[in-house]
Amino acid sequence: MAEIITMEGGNRLVGQVRVEGAKNACLPIMAAALLCEEQVVLCEIPPLEDVQTMCKVLAALGVQSKFCAADKKLRISAGQLNMNEAPAELVRQMRASFLVIGPLLARTGRARVCLPGGCAIGIRPIDLHLKGLKALGAEVLIGQGFIETTANKLQGQTVYLDFPSVGATETIMMAAALARGVTVIENAAEEPEVVDLARFINSMGGRVIGAGTETVRIYGVSKLYGCEYSVIPDRIEAGTLMVAAAITAGAITIENVIPTHLVPLIAKLRETGCHVLEEDAQVHVSRNSPICAVNLKTLPYPGFPTDLQSPMMALLTLANGRSVITETVFENRFRHVEELRRMGAQIKIEAHCAVVTGRDSLRGTILKATDLRAAAALILAGLAAKGRSQVSQVHHLDRGYWQFTEKLASLGADIRRLSLRQAADDL
Ligand code: EPZ
C-alpha cells in the first residue's frame, strides 16, 4: 500500500541507534550461497525489501531460504538447485539479482538472466561482468533483453577491469571460486562488501586472496561446503545516521559500526565542523557550531562513497558558503537536486558537479523520492527544515533501510509513516 513519510523539522536528534547488517554485502553473499549444496546460515541479515527479493530469486531457482526475524538469521539450502534461469521480472525489479549469473554458471554450467537495465542513477552496464565470464572460458550470448551463458568447466584467467566495478568483481570472484586453476582480477573493487563476499567464500572452503586490494587471486576448488557467517555492518546506513546527527545539530551514538569503513565520511563531517568520536564498534557524532562548506568527490573505495553523496548534499545545503560535490561513479546521481531546490536549496549542476550555496534554512514541502539514497537525503533535509515535509515513493527507502523512521523517531524526530489517505489530513 502506498505510503508517505511526514515530518516536522527542527528537532535535534539525540541518543543511540544500532545499524543493521550491510545490504550490499547480503545480496552478493546470498547469490554466492548457490555455489554449495549444503545449508549456509547467514547472520545479521536485515529483512529489507531487497533481501526479500533476492529470496524470491533463489526460490525461483529451486533454492529454499528461511528467514528468522527473531535472530535475523537466513538459512539457504541450495542442494535442490534445479533451474538456471533467473525470473526476468525480479531481475528488472532489483538489478542485484543479476549477481546470480556467476554462481549459477559455476555450479550448473549454464545461466540465463535478463539484462538488468538501467535505473534512476544511470544506465548501469554489465560489460565488465561479461568480460570476466568470457575470460574464464564461458560462451556468452546476448539475446533480446537477456544474457545466456554456458561453460563446461570454467578455467582460471587474469582479468583486468577497466573500472573497479563492485558487481563485476563479485561476479568474477563467484564464478572463479569453482573454476580450474587461478583467476587474477586486476583493478578489482576494494569495497568492504567485496571483502565480505571473499571471506564468505573462504568460509565455505574457497581460496580468495587479496580482496580489499586492487589485485584479487581466486584459487578454484572442486567443492564448497555449508557454513555459518555474519555479514558486516551497513556502512551506508551508519553514514546516513551520522549525517542525521550533523544536519539536526544533534548528538548520536551509532552502534555496530566499523569506523575504518567510514574514513572519508568521518573526515568530511569533521571538516564541516562536526565532532566525531570513533570507538571500537561505534561512532559518536555531534554538532554545536555552524556547518562549514566542504568540497567532496565520490570515488571507488577507499574514496568517498557515492551512496552517501545525496545525504551529504542535504547537509551542505545548510552550510556557510559554497560546496562543490563531484559525482564520478554514476552518470545520473543528482535526481535529488530538483527536490532539494523545492525546499529552497541553492544548487547549480555543471556536468558531474553540483555547486551548493548554503542557506540559513530549508522550508518543508511535499517531496518525491526518486531512488534509495535520494529518499534518505530528502528525509534528512526534512528533519532540518522549517515546517512540515512529506516524502512520497517511500518504497525506495525500504529497499535499503530497515525501520528507518522508527530509528529516527527513537532519536527524537517528529516523523511518521502514513497511508496516502491519512496524509491528505496531515498537511
Ligand atoms: C554497487 O553497485 C552497489 N550495489 C551500489 O549501491 C553502489 O552505489 C555501487 O556498487 C558503487 O559503490 C550493490 O552492491 C547491490 P559498480 P554496482 O559496478 O555493483 C560502471 C545502493 O544505493 N560499470 O561498481 O552496480 C557503472 O556504470 C546501490 O545501495 C560498467 O561500466 O556498481 C558505474 O558507473 C546503488 N560496466 C560504475 O561502474 C560494468 O560491467 C560503478 O558501478 C559494471 C559497472
Image (cartoon, rainbow, N blue to C red):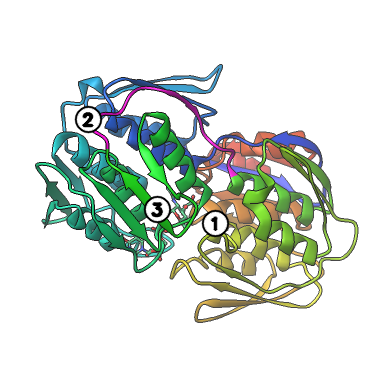
* Amino acid type of the residue tagged 2 in the rendering: Leu
Q: Where in the figure is residue 159, as x and y percent of width and height? A: 28, 60
The reply to whether the C-beta atoms of the residues labelled 3 and 2 are less than 8 Å apart is: no
Magenta span has 113? Answer: no
Q: Residue at x 48, y 27 (%)?
A: 229
Q: Which quadrant of the structure image shows residue 17? A: top right
Q: CA distance from mark 1 to mark 2?
A: 30 Å
Q: Which quadrant of the structure image shows residue 359? A: bottom right
Residue 307's disc number: 1
The chief SS type of the magenta part is: loop
* Amino acid type of the residue tagged 1 in the rendering: Asp
* Amino acid type of the residue tagged 3 in the rendering: Val
The residue beneath circle 2 is: 61
Taking the image as shown, residue 331 lies to the left or right of residue 307, namely left
The residue beneath circle 3 is: 216
Q: Which residues are magenta?
A: 221-234
